[in-house]
Amino acid sequence: MDQKYNPFSLNDKLILITGASSGIGRQCAIACSLMGARVVLLGRDQERLAATLRMMTEPLKHIKYAMDLVDFKKVEEVVSDLVSKQGTIDGLINCAGVSTTLPLNSSTPEKMEHFLKTNVIGPMNLTRLVVKHSNFSKSGGSIIFISSVMGIVGDSGKVLYSMTKGALIASVKSLAVELSSRHIRVNTISPGVVESPMSQRAVYSKDRESLRRIEGLHLLGLGKTEDVAHACVYLLSDSAKWITGTNLIIDGGYLAK
């Protein structure tokens, strides 16, 4: 075997990453650049996207767009622009999303709609545009949605978050079937609690006792953004060419008990 062969290489693949301004999305961008990909960073904050770019290998090789996924007209313009400048797309990681801990009786239709638009409709609409025949590689590729263990099991105050993350897991199965003839693989990744800006803003991070309870639910402790980013690299690479329609659980043992 060629000693230089790397089954996880993303060399010259064009990869889009949403939520690339922080947390898991930022780490995915860094990891993909290390594996040779050309990365398109998508996020709402121009300055934080620029910060991510500076952390990546060969920053001049990558581009960024500041946008909100629920600005559907802007999203369509961005996809058209990047394909015209960079060529067809080989992969997409849907990282952007929101989380909360909120009892059902404190929820409103407006809050439900916000969560659905941000966590489900926005990523699905972007995916719809990305996989158009004129925009996606003719040889196929990989689409990843970041879901959550809360899409599989429940917890108090997680109704809004769980309904959106569960929707992604269910939708991906049908999407994988629909796109299989074009060799486009579609999968979800369901992390447990990962140390990130999102988890640091969570209710359980506000006091030490609650945080210890959450840590205790993970047999291997809380995760790192690298744990999810490396799994994304795997699913984007040719090493995962026979994997589609599945949900990869990366939870430090959260669901083992």
Image (cartoon, rainbow, N blue to C red):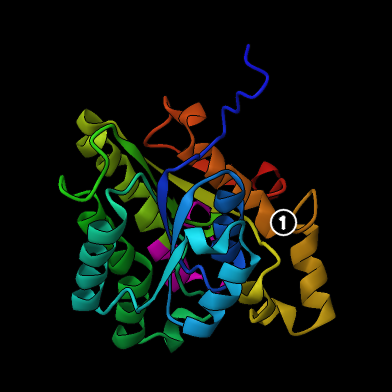
Residue pushed farthest top?
1
Q: Residue at x 70, y 77 (%)?
A: 204
- Type of the residue with mark 1: Gly
Above or below for 56 versus 22: above
Determine the secondary structure under disc 1.
loop
Q: Residue at x 52, y 57 (%)?
A: 148
Where residue 171 appears, x then y in whole percent? 30, 49
47 horizontally vs 188: left or right: right
Above or below for 58 versus 10: below
Badge 1 is on which residue?
Answer: 223
Above or below for 28 versus 42: above
* Residue 158 lies within the magenta run: yes
Q: Residue 163: name its quadrant.
A: bottom left
Compare residues 21 and 206 and report the one nearer the observer.
21
Compare residues 64 and 44 and report the one nearer the observer.
64
- Which corner quadrant holds the C terminus? top right
What's drawn in magenta, residue-wise?
A: 151-164
Q: Is residue 125 visible?
A: no
Q: Residue at x 43, y 85 (%)?
A: 105
Where residue 256 appears, x then y in whole percent? 68, 42
Where residue 174 appears, x then y in whole percent? 26, 41
* Residue 4 lies within the magenta run: no
10 Å crowding of disc 1: few (<14), some (14-19), many (20+): some
- Which corner quadrant holds the N terminus? top right
Q: Residue at x 82, y 69 (%)?
A: 212
